[in-house]
Image (cartoon, rainbow, N blue to C red):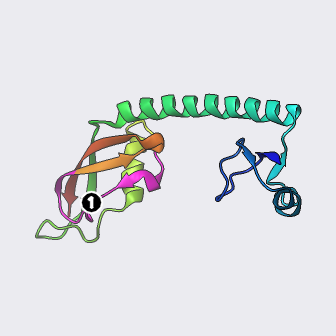
Amino acid sequence: MKVVLLKDVKTLGLEGSVIEVSEGYARNFLFPQNLAVQASAQALANAKEKKERVSAKEKKALVASRKLADKLDGMELTVTAKVNEKGSLFGALSVKEIVKAIKKAGAVVEPEWIVIPKPIKETGTHRITVDLPQGLEAEISLSVEGEV
């Protein structure tokens, strides 16, 4: 029996895929859980239309991510933090503070996109990577200045 998947099914395929499954599997598992519908002309047309919408949406997201990556790449930020007499920070610089500094510079990023190789506990210049959606990356130069 040919079916069109309505949702991603780990063992079968992605949403919108047309696959061949046994009639019992389709009737007893896929149909009751609204994971698939029987492949008809209408179902195939709906799946194709949905794929086109998703594709257009992904293209827009990729363009937006590229613009953000271009804006962030090479950005130089300065953050001021409290330090002790040796020049070390009292605590590591948090991702929230970095996100706030990026926002102040005119870009908006999610905290989970920030990649810090090791905790920033000293003043100086540090390299930070921003992993953007769609597999894009940007590198930021972060200058940490101390204030007593």
Counting other residues with Cα less than 10 Å from the Cα at mark 1, is it few (<14), some (14-19), or many (20 or more)? few
Which quadrant of the structure image shows residue 90? bottom left
Residue under the image location 12 percent in, 70 percent down: 85
Measuring from the top left, give residue 73's x and y in whole percent: 31, 36
Q: Left or right: 134 with respect to 40?
A: left
Residue placed most toward the observer, 147 or 56: 56
- Kindly identify which residue carries mark 1: 117
Q: What residue range appears in magenta?
A: 109-126
Task: Report the number of numbered marks.
Answer: 1
Which quadrant of the structure image shows residue 118? bottom left
* Up-down relation of residue 59 to residue 115 (above or below): above
Q: Left or right: 36 with respect to 64?
A: right
Measuring from the top left, give residue 35's x and y in whole percent: 79, 54
Which quadrant of the structure image shows residue 24? bottom right
Image quadrant in which the C terminus is located: bottom left
Residue under the image location 37 percent in, 32 percent down: 71
Which amino acid type is shown beneath numbered disc 1? Pro
Residue placed most toward the observer, 41 or 139: 41
